[in-house]
Amino acid sequence: MSRILVIHGPNLNLLGKREPEIYGKVTLNQINRALKQLAKERNVELDIVQTNHEGEIVELIGKAEKNFAGIIINPAGYTHTSVAIRDALEAVKIPIVEVHLSNIYAREDFRHKSLIAPVVDGQVTGFGFYSYLLGLEAILYLLEQK
Ligand code: DQA
């Protein structure tokens, strides 16, 4: 059975309480449950991690190729700043999908630039928690094409 790594970046542990007008009222637990349900239906296994630490994300990505068929990542604030996460993703040769709850292109100027987008297979942005489910469908599609 394929295993997919899901990485939630900084502050996503606060979902539900954090700026609900932007991110919605859904909690990270609810997102993870919906992801696991879809994974079960699609017969894949998920490992889901949330961390507020850039270096931890870099390490997770660095070790991913051995154990996972693909990566879904919401780098959150690091999307716009982290050369280290971008470099780590660029080095990995499995399908990678970047997801965002909000539409980063409809927000402040500094969010319009993703350092991550050029080195991943694709980006899903703006569909609230559903971005993650679309991200999982996208990874499964990419794996089928292989
Ligand atoms: C986010 C968008 C980022 O700009 C922001 O820093 C986040 C969440 C999103 O999912 O919409 O923390 O990645």
Image: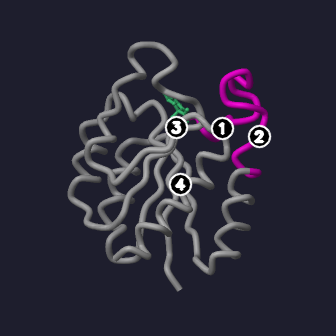
Q: Are marks 2 and 1 in contact (CB under 8 Å)?
A: yes
Q: Which residue is mark 2?
A: 26
Which quarter of the figure is the C terminus placed in? bottom left
Spatial separation of the CA atoms under disc 2 and disc 3: 16 Å
Dividing the picture into quadrants, the one containing residue 142 is bottom left
Q: Name which of mark 2 and mark 3 comes first in the sequence.
A: 2
Callout 3, which amino acid? Thr
Residues in magenta, as a range: 10-30
Secondary structure under the numbered disc 3 in the rendered image: strand
Secondary structure under the numbered disc 1 in the rendered image: loop
Secondary structure under the numbered disc 2 in the rendered image: loop
Callout 2, which amino acid? Val
Looking at this view, name the residue that lies furthest to the front: 145
Spatial separation of the CA atoms under disc 2 and disc 4: 17 Å
Can residue 34 be spotted in the picture? Answer: yes
Q: Which residue is mark 4?
A: 135
The crowd level at tag 2 (other Cα within 10 Å; few <14, some 14-19, many 20+) is some
